[in-house]
Image (cartoon, rainbow, N blue to C red):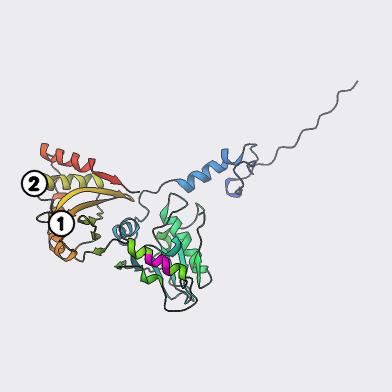
Amino acid sequence: MAKKRTQTKAAKPQLNDGEIPVVGAREPCPCGSGRRYKACHGRAAAHAVTELVQRPFEGLPSECDWVALRELVPAATVPLTLKDGLPDGVPSVTLATVLPMAWPALRREDGSVLLGLQNDTSSGDLGRDLADTLQRALATEPGNPVPAHRVEPEGPRLQDLLAADGSFEPVVHTGFEFWIPESEGDATSSPEIAASLERANAAAIPTVKLAGVDAAYWCETPDKNHLRWVMPHPEEKLLDALARLHAAGESSLGEGTRLVGSFRAHGLMVPVWDLPTGVGADEVEKPAARFAERLAAALTVDAPLSADERRARGGLTNRQITLS
């Protein structure tokens, strides 16, 4: 008796990486490997989306202010300059710390764009997420918010869209009245947004940007005031310099003030000073400028730390908190 002939399926041709579409995680990978997508090409795609970019604002004008507005400042706006200029029908693009209803962006009725900074993002690259939101806002029909969206890993970053030589001058507001336009019909013209505005204003911590030094922000809290200062220097070098000043008794901003520690945010250090309740932003301007001079000198010192300076450095390191 002749053996029954068995038929075999022809091997599915393999695709190049650039041709492989995105499918469900449990579906067979379109490359023809026989494995599920999540265990094959989906693994690399997921890694590309979630890989953390430590300094998402590096290379942008005023990187330190970007960090401050993302993490420290309740209400602020900044006009943005696009590398290729404004598209037709878009009179302006403005960065805003927060938008109503946590919208990622808003295209106003007049065509102008507000881009929200303090939003949850879908990947580990904040610069790419914001660039995707900005591009979608520019194409959104006027009078509408831009919804959240999962970002593709190959898209442009903010550094690709914004002019490298553009100015970045934050305007800190006492509240969120910039949400409400003068024109009717905008997405923010509603009773719900008005109620949200009232709640946001009640929760906002009074904040002022110092004029004499870069990226330093005074804020007022019920118990005491603070100065939070985002600095661009490499972390190890900055810690050494702050330790030298602290050990020498030169790290304060005047009587009753104290360097209490620092935040780490988006790859930069943010030293924090406690200030007496009665010390306002104007009274910190000159002490902060003098401290900047002392810090600049300390940053040039390469000698090993003394025992006192090492203890001061250890104390500063122990009081460091990572925000992002």
- Residue 202 shows up from this direction: yes
Residue under the image location 23 percent in, 40 percent down: 318
Q: Which mark is residue 248?
A: 2
Instruction: State whether residue 324 is above or below residue 220.
Output: above
Q: Residue 70: percent from the left, percent from the top?
A: 35, 57
Residue type marked 2: Ala
SS state under label 2:
loop
Residue under the image location 49 percent in, 71 percent down: 187
Q: Residue 118: percent from the left, percent from the top?
A: 39, 58
Residue type marked 1: Pro
- Which residue in the protein does label 1 denote? 276
Crowding at dot 2, Cα within 10 Å, few <14 / some 14-19 / many 20+, comes out as: few
- Which portion, as a residue range, is magenta? 194-198
Residue 196 part of the magenta segment:
yes
Crowding at dot 1, Cα within 10 Å, few <14 / some 14-19 / many 20+, comes out as: some
Q: Residue 163: percent from the left, percent from the top?
A: 38, 66
Instruction: State whether residue 301 is above or below residue 81.
Output: above
Q: Is residue 100 left or right of residue 169?
A: right
Q: Residue 148: percent from the left, percent from the top?
A: 50, 58
Residue 57 part of the magenta segment:
no
Q: Principal SS element in the magenta part?
A: helix
Between marks 1 and 2 in the image, the one whose residue lies nearer the viewer: 1
- Residue 304 shows up from this direction: no
* Camera-side residue of 5 and 237: 237
Q: Which residue ends up furthest to the right in the rendered image?
A: 1
SS state under label 1:
loop
Residue under the image location 28 percent in, 45 percent down: 321
Q: Is residue 58 left or right of residue 207?
A: right
